[in-house]
Amino acid sequence: MIKGLYFDGATSDKKEVFLYVTDTGRIGFNGINKEPLSFDMIKVSPRIGNTARYIDLQDGAQFETEDNDAIDDIVKSLSPEKFNGFIHKLESVKRFVLLTVFIVIFIAWGFIQYGVPYFSREFASMLPDDASEYLGQGILETLDEHWFEDSQLPEARKKELTVVFNDLLVEIGEKNIVLEFRNSIKIGANAFALPNRTIVFTDDLINLSNSNDEIISIMLHEIGHLDNLHSLRSTIQRFSLAMFVMVITGDVSTSSSLITALPVVLLEAGYSREIEAEADTYALEKMLKHNINPVFFATIMQKLEASHSSKYLECRKNDKYSLEECLIIAVQDKRESGKDDEMIMGYISTHPLSKERMQRFNKAAF
Amino acid sequence: MQDNDLGKETSYSDKPFEFTGKAMEFFSIWIVNVALTILTLGIYSAWAKVRTHQYFYGNTKLDDATFRYLADPKQILKGRIIAFAFFMAYYFAGLISPIAAGIIFVFILLLIPALIVMSMSFRLRNSAYRNVKFDFNKNFKRAYLIFSMPVVFIGAYVFIASQFQPEVTVDTNENAVLSIMIGVLPLLILFLIPWWEFMITQFKVLNSKYGDAALTFQATTKDYFKMYALVMLMPMLALALIAVIASIIIPMIGLSGVNPFDFSGLTVMTIPIVLIILLFYVWIFAYVQTKRTNLVFNNVNLNGHQLNSDLKVGYMMYLYFTNTIAMALTLGLMMPWAKIRTAKYKASVTSLTPAGNLGEFASMQLQNQSAIGEEIGEMFDMDLGF
């Protein structure tokens, strides 16, 4: 006898009844006037933890009980199906659950570490070039509107660098890459590789260098981004990561979306670092192959980093010092204070530690 | 069996809601859901959703009977596939052409009112209590009327603002009047938010049914203005507080010779400000959730049976704060625990004051319902619940 509640389905009226199984395997109810039913005329809801079980009868009535084990016994003895309660078994056996925890952590780690980068690399190379073209055009327009001004470099310097760039392209066997110059007070010294095969140098970065080899090393780094379709890849990575987090967390209404945003931000920074390292590898390989001393990348990186430090910005406000003097002061200051993390915040998270990057090129220097 | 008189007496006193879920038990269900979802590349997520809902419904008790979630996972999967296709189309169209993405976005925007109605309908028709289903009256016309209001207001504002660009107008007097208008209008629109939320909630409640009985809603626009008044005041107070703290700390940093733009200096300066913002964020979140739930529940009536909710802002803040910290420290593994304790607290402060016998509600004949509305809504992160 299983104690439970009976609802006829026509109204919300509740009756206390007792379920029993006859000798012939039929299900009957004590407390209401009903003929015992055969097992295939009823439907037993699957077990979910210790929540109430429902037995739906053919006429729309419902029996509700909390005696899960008794219902399980009936199902076991009367149901012809073997896989009844398979999911519940997974959920209720501690060993399975523990195993599942490890499986989930392992898969999540593998997916984030290898799956997302691999998938996005494959997918990026499948997309038509038009996609990159549109994407890059849009980015350049936005940048021009909000961040960039026209370059202030002398025409002769621009021409010289364009020649250097085109020679470099021929040498390394790349083509269809456009070099652009822009000035940006807001961004400072930096270079960008846009997916429509355009590389943008800011005036500040050009002014930081004292040798064209330094600029060539940055050019190679940016070509490395283009060669590996990094813009498309990071877009796809961001998308798959968001999807993955959504699938795992479902709806997180108990806290706020802040909690899911945080890991995504951290993981994206991780992917970004990976992408930067890949572009560095490309640059280093090409420099060694074409006899350009890798030390130039390290020197321009050091100056680039110094140019974003507060010491440098402070110094530049003062008319007494020239750009070179300020750079020297900033580099000196960094060396003395031993602080490697003194950069603008965006820089620290999305790029590998510049100390490590520089070391890599310094080691390969000749 | 109970004595008849005694039985009657207890049925008229307040009936508390009870949530009987356990964190460990739900953790097992959740982690198996996640594992199977990953292993089936997301397909199992529909079954996972049903099991999760069934766990929470089945553990919610009122007057000895439980709530029941009846949705068919296959239907949810169908909805999910369509929603996913929409989402992919929108996302990748954005990469290739902003115009194509814009068209898809507008298309989805136009569908939102219909999606909300379909989603409400799907959810309620698949919810039952005492073998009587809930229902939602699919009033598409009214949904479009209500949801198009902000579009009309904002559209009118953009139109007015674009008509009088500074370089077009020559008359400076006219210019000044217009700039005031353009500045004041957004505030007016902001002022309409409480009223709008009232309209939406009223729409949702009045079209909901339990069996063949319709819900009624006694809240007024005034209640919603009251609720928002504090929310709109608090940001100003918080800003003032931040300004005071910053004005104390920045000169201190200046004196000690640390550059405020220095990364190390920045952390010193930002810690109290970030803490205030975080605390404020949690407070706003908890305040709005709490007051909104209380307001809706305490004004929903079903044939004289009255719902009561007495959520406390302080306790909700504490819950959200500790939930967030626990989840952050365990990389999300404490999420099931967080969900269970939140549900437990919510149930513990909810009750029903019956006007008579709860057995009086009659069922309605219902047809099957598509899950597409609910799923697309969820993909685009809309709040579809009460």
Image (cartoon, rainbow, N blue to C red):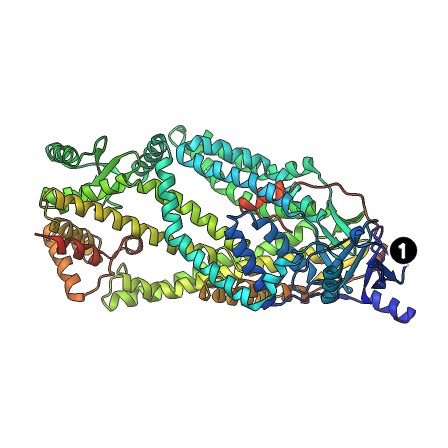
Q: Nearer the viewer, residue A167 or B265?
A: A167
Q: Position of residue A140 (x, y in %)?
A: 30, 36
Q: Choose top left, top right, bottom left or bottom right for residue B92.
A: top left
Which residue is farthest left? A366
Q: Position of residue B6 (x, y in %)?
A: 88, 71
Residue at the location (19% across, 58% down)? A311
Q: Nearer the viewer, residue B62 or A288?
A: A288
A135 horizontally vs B288: left or right:
left
Instruction: Say few, some or many: other residues with alpha carbon within 10 Å of mark 1 (under 14 / 14 to 19 / 20 or more).
Output: few
Residue at the location (44% across, 56% down)? A108
What residue did someone put label 1 on? A35
B309 horizontally vs B83: left or right:
right
Check disc 1 and report its element: helix, strand or loop.
loop
A297 horizontally vs B217: left or right:
left
- Answer above or below: position of A279 versus A333: above
Q: Position of residue B95 (x, y in %)?
A: 40, 36
Mark yes or no: residue B55 visible: yes
Q: Nearer the viewer, residue B291 or B346?
A: B346
